[in-house]
Amino acid sequence: MASTYGPGGGAKLRCAASSSAAAPARPVKAPRFIQHKKEAFWFYRFISVAYDNVFNPGHFTENMRDDALEPADLYSSHLKVVDVGGGTGFTTLGIVKHVDPENVTLLDQSPHQLEKARQKVALKGVTIMEGDAEDLPFPTDTFDRYVSAGSIEYWPDPQRGIKEAYRVLKFGGTACVIGPVYPTFWLSRFFADMWMLFPQEEEYIEWFKKAGFKDVKLKRIGPKWYRGVRRHGLIIGCSVTGVKRERGDSSLELGPKAEDVSKPVNPITFLFRFLIGTICAAYYVLVPIYMWIKDKIVPKGMPI
Ligand SMILES: C[S@@+](CC[C@H](N)C(=O)[O-])C[C@H]1O[C@@H](n2cnc3c(N)ncnc32)[C@H](O)[C@@H]1O
């Protein structure tokens, strides 16, 4: 299904479910090198240094962020909002455009990312805390909105994270998960699969529905200079929303956690995973630059 991009880089199309890849994706539970909690922790130990200025702008612009947050319906200053995997606060800055910072909580597993968020004047008043998306430290039925942007790809068990989103939302609350989409081009697929989780659009829909969300919708987004190209996958490629229509926890039963962080890891295995995963991530630093050059060279209106 083709999508057209608006001036902000956001696709105008909204769909209930559609195929994002011709090729079958690797199963969610198949190991990817950085889709582990300890590896993600160390990955962001280094990435946080240049996250806002170097790594993020190639994948997630302010216009894209505002487009992606639009279905979250944040247009009341009184809403109680949690931003999970909020990192340096880039998406939180989009939230506090509408919501009082005192009503916003930013949670992330990386103290290094959070340190950057603490330095942002516009986030003064926001509660900033460490925590795990798959085990949120909040009571059931707490928030009006749950937002998570660009974080699900690191969660070893995304279904568990979305079930947590459901649990912490109040009756009538909305969850908005912004995340990657799976590539179809073979080389991009190879690097994506070695690095972290790039879900298919259908997988997001299924996770939301299984958790108990109703009115599940997916909005495609992407950088403006990609001209709608999705074959390389996108680190930020869609915004998925769902509404909680009942009080209490989700009835979905899950087994034990996919990963126990208290268990020691073999340092050789860890180093191997970390190095290979980071090298593969570097491919995705180059993709937006390659697409930007193509956008400059290929005449406007032509496919790139
Ligand atoms: C690509 S950054 C996105 C940051 C921010 N949401 C934004 O829009 O710029 C991904 C973030 O997810 C966090 N993260 C990864 N796994 C997590 C987990 N299990 N629980 C909480 N945060 C997690 C990382 O530490 C990192 O800050």
Image: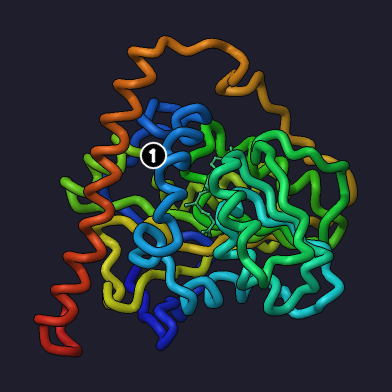
Residue in the image at 53% along x and 76% along y:
67
User: Which residue position holds label 1?
Assistant: 196
**Residue 126: image location, x then y, percent:** 76, 61
**Residue 118: image location, x then y, percent:** 65, 57
- Is residue 119 something that shows in the picture? yes
Instruction: Place residue 167 in its image quadrant.
Output: top right
Q: Quadrant of the N terminus?
A: bottom left
Callout count: 1
Query: Residue type at mark 1?
Result: Met
How crowded pointer 1 is (Cα within 10 Å; few <14, some 14-19, many 20+) is rated as: many
**Left or right: residue 86 compared with residue 225:** right
Q: Is residue 127 above or below residue 154?
A: below
**Residue 292: image location, x then y, percent:** 21, 73
In the image, 136 versus 248, the foreground residue is 136
Colour setting: rainbow
Queried on whether the Cβ of the residue with tag 1 lies below 8 angstroms from ligand 1, the answer reads: no
Residue in the image at 45% along x and 62% along y:
52
Q: Quadrant of the C terminus?
A: bottom left
In the image, 258 versus 115, the foreground residue is 115
Residue in the image at 68% along x and 63% along y:
215
**Left or right: residue 125 compared with residue 221:** right
